[in-house]
Image: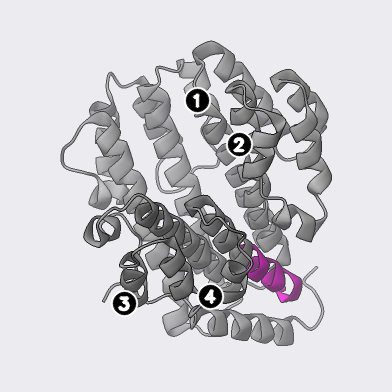
Amino acid sequence: MPPQNLISDTVYASTKSYAAKGTILSRAAIENLTEARDLEELVLRLKATAYDDAVSRIEKPLSSSRIERAAREHVAKVHFDLMRVSPLAPLLSAAFLHYVSSNLKIILKGKVLGKSFEDIRRHVHLYPEQLIGRRDLINRALVAEGLDDVAAQLGKNEFTDDVNLAISAYHNNKRPGVFDLYLDKAYYTNLSAVFWKLRRSGYPFGSSVVQLGELISLDVDSHNILSVLRAKSWQMSFNETKSLIIEPTYEISLESLIKMANAESIPSAAHYLENTPYKKILPSEGSSQALIGALEHSFKIRMYEIASHPFLWDVFSSGLPFALTRLKELEATTIASIAFGVEQNIKPGDIQSKLIMPKK
């Protein structure tokens, strides 16, 4: 059943989301960050933004990874605070598992690369899990002796089945990247299932069902398309490739995805996108890896656009908190890219060309 005081809670959560949207970095602010001469100056400039508290706690010496961690900590806190006040908390909670998924990827890839416990631990970010009381899951995975032990330590949760599939796939092709594909599958499968459960339960979405549906469908479709293409580029078996596909599909049919998996090459697989709404973002040329990279970037741009729309015309929509978390996640990714670029002395213009930013 919908929570009590739904209307007032929706207004409060939407108001908080709209206020947070006002702190999203403008294009000019992002460009200003890319012009920092070094990481110290970048942190100084970030202190003039909503990231002030987070970056003020960064320990020396500064590094791009520490700045990224601070940015994601800020986003996790914003997400968690909205989750506590929004009637749409079940969907926001499912989305919050992105942080658990990211840590599991780091741990699994660290194990197969032979990294030490301390080295893996430095890259794991436990703050989000601490907020929701799930640190034990990540801690069990951290202390596991190897891949099979990680699977055993996880027990039964949202990620168990796909972690086992990922381990099997890794044994077959020895590519650590398979863990990204399978854990993304687990995350988006659960997110989509929660969305449909809420729709069927009679939750009064109102107009926000369209906004949320667009975001969820883009999540699932982009995962399915990019996973099939990456699986092909890594020469994964047809059955392994098929196991990466999330159902139900949305704007691209299962039949088309199967045809993509059976195609002879990446370009011929991408050809099947021409009969979908994603024809508009299909790169016209480029190598297989360049095509996949360009598609991924275009999906992120589309996500930013869709997540921005409700703030323009539906200021009290129950979907605003979810849309806001998507904008903040993309913003944290942008800050991470800027920090890396500044650290590597990459020219501002070259950094900007790879970023997801608001239009002028």
Dot 1 lies on which element?
helix
Of 316 and 321, the residue lying toward us: 321
Disc 3 to disc 1, C-alpha distance: 43 Å
Horizontal and vertical percent for residue 139?
Answer: 79, 39
Name the disc covering residue 103, or none: none
- Label 1 or label 4, whichever comes before in sequence order: 4
Horizontal and vertical percent for residue 68?
Answer: 52, 56
**Marks 2 & 1, CB-CB < 8 Å contact:** no
Dot 3 surroundings within 10 Å: few (below 14), some, or many (20 or more)? Answer: few
- Label 2 or label 1, whichever comes before in sequence order: 2
Left or right, 199 with reference to 350: right
The kind of residue on which mark 4 rests is Ser
Q: For the residues carrying marks 2 and 3, which lies nearer the camera in this image?
A: 3
- Label 3 or label 4, whichever comes before in sequence order: 3
Dot 1 surroundings within 10 Å: few (below 14), some, or many (20 or more)? Answer: some
Q: Is 13 above or below relative to 289? A: below
**To which quarter of the image does residue 42 belong?**
bottom left
Disc 2 to disc 1, C-alpha distance: 21 Å
Q: Is residue 81 magenta?
A: yes
**Marks 3 & 4, CB-CB < 8 Å contact:** no
- Label 3 or label 1, whichever comes before in sequence order: 3
On the rendered image, what quadrant is the N terminus found in? bottom right
The kind of residue on which mark 2 rests is Lys
**To which quarter of the image does residue 353 belong?**
bottom left
Q: For the residues carrying marks 2 and 1, which lies nearer the camera in this image?
A: 2
Of 111 and 101, the residue lying toward us: 111
Name the chief secondary structure element in magenta.
Answer: helix
Magenta stretch bounds: 76-87
Left or right, 49 with reference to 288: right
The residue sitting at 36% across, 20% down in the picture is: 262
Name the disc covering residue 28, or none: 3
